[in-house]
Image (cartoon, rainbow, N blue to C red):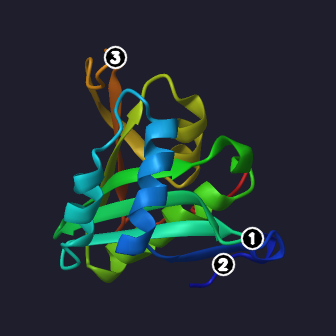
Amino acid sequence: MKLSPKLELAGVSLREMTEADIPAVETLERRLFPVDAWPLQMFFDELAQPETRRYVVAEVGGEIVAYAGLMCIEPIADVQTIAVVPEFEGKGIGSAVLTELIDEARRRRAADVLLEVRADNPRAQQLYLRFGFEQIHVRPRYYRDGTDALIMRLELNKPQSNEGATA
């Protein structure tokens, strides 16, 4: 996969997630999302559906530092998950994995990409806004701890002049 020069210099590689990655990804999932972590089997179930799913991991020195997944059932693509370990935030890795998911949605001819983001996660919200996502709805008390989810949409047929821009 093509990475930005900045990521290549930082030693980051982006690749397909495999079943062999699931134990490490699940450990990160429990660390990053302790209240809402996916069960281990869910990752296996997601990877078993390549006709509608795409999952990627980002590595530094052979260690997974980010992962993301997309479900696409034309005409809608949905970001299932996206996570970057805190020590690697702000280095463009989130932008790289999100770019890959959006590119995959385009390859699968999706018209829109949807996602949910915690209302109390302004950093992630800003990333999505930079890519051209707009908030279209709120799901009250969506997360297990009672936090609202903001539903955001990126229209793929609409010109995106700032897509991929980094702050």
Tag in front: 2 or 3: 3
Given the image, on which type of amino acid does mark 3 rest?
Asp
Name the spot of residue 86 as percent of width and height, x first: 66, 41
Q: Residues within 10 Å of mark 2 (few under 14, many from 20)?
A: some
Left or right: 60 in relation to 125? right
Q: Are marks 2 and 3 in contact (CB under 8 Å)?
A: no
Q: What amino acid does circle 1 point to? A: Leu
The percent position of residue 73, horizontal first and vertical second, equals 16, 68
Sooner in the amino-acid sequence: mark 2 or mark 3: 2
In the foreground, 120 or 152: 120
Quadrant containing the N terminus is: bottom right
> Residue 7 got which mark?
1
| Disc sitting over residue 83 in the figure | none
Q: Which residue is mark 3?
A: 145
Q: Is residue 111 visible?
A: no
Res 2 visible? yes
Amino acid marked by disc 2: Leu
Check the image and report above or below for 139 versus 46: above
Task: Kindly indicate whether the residue at mark 2 contacts the one at mark 1 (C-beta within 8 angstroms).
Answer: yes
23 vs 36: above or below: below
Secondary structure type for disc 3: loop
Q: Residue at x 26, y 25 (%)?
A: 142
Residue 3 tag number: 2
In the displayed structure, 37 sits above or below 140; it is: below
Q: Position of residue 15 (x, y in %)?
A: 52, 78
Residue at position x 38%, y 51% from top?
81
Q: CA distance from mark 1 to mark 2?
A: 6 Å
